[in-house]
Image (spheres, helix red, strand yellow):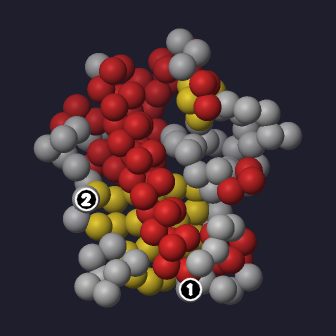
Amino acid sequence: MSERLLELIIEYQSHVVGGVRALREKFGVDDILGAVLRGEIPDVGSLDDRHETRFRFHGSGCHLDSDQGEVEFDFGPDGRHDGFDGWRLWIFAQSRPKDYPQFQRLEIVESMLGELVTDDWVIRPGWLPSPQLCYFKDQFSAVH
C-alpha cells in the first residue's frame, strides 16, 4: 500500500504545482505568498471566470478547490510548495474517494507516511514557515 501512498503524494503535488502555476499566471507574480502578505493578491477568489477553481489563502498556505479535487498546501522556504503532511494528503484523498478509498482515514495516511519517513523516502527537515511539512528525500536540498 506504500506504493499507493506514493502515487497519492505525487498526484497531490501535481495539483499543487498546477494551482501555483495558475495563481502566478493570473496575478503575474512569482512570489505568491509575498504578494498575498503585501495585499497584492486577494485572500479569496477564483482562478477562472466560471468560478470552477477557487482559492483561499491563510497564514503560510492556500486552499484550492475544484472539480478535480481539493488541495491544502503550505509554502515552505524560498517559496517551495512541494511539501506535504498526513493531514494535507488526507484532505486530498477525501476529495477523491473513488481514487483513494484506502486513504479515507487520517490515521492510516499518517501511519503510512511515518513508514516512508522511517524507510528514508521522505524527510521532515523542520523548515520554516511550515516545519511540519515532509519532502521527498530526492527533492531535498539544504535551504538553511
Q: Quadrant of residue 95?
A: bottom left
47 left or right, relative to 26: left
Identify the residue at image location x=22%, y=49%: 96
State yes or no: discs 1 and 2 in contact (Cβ < 8 Å): no
2 left or right, relative to 101: right
Residue 111 x/y as whole percent: 43, 25
Q: Residue furthest top?
A: 119
Q: Residues within 10 Å of mark 2 (few under 14, many from 20)?
A: few
What kind of residue is marked 1?
Pro
Residue 143 x/y as whole percent: 80, 40
Residue 23 x/y as whole percent: 50, 71
Location of mark 1 (residue): 42
Count the marks.
2
Residue 73 seen anywhere in this rendered image of the structure: yes
Q: Quadrant of residue 75?
A: bottom right
Q: Residue furthest left?
A: 98
Residue 66 x/y as whole percent: 29, 67
C-alpha distance separating marks 1 and 2? 23 Å
| Quadrant of the rendering where the C terminus is positioned | top right
Seen from the viewer's position, the closer of residues 53 and 103 is: 53
124 left or right, relative to 63: right
Q: Residues within 10 Å of mark 1 (few under 14, many from 20)?
A: some
Helix, strand or loop at label 1? It is loop
Helix, strand or loop at label 2? It is loop
Location of mark 2 (residue): 68
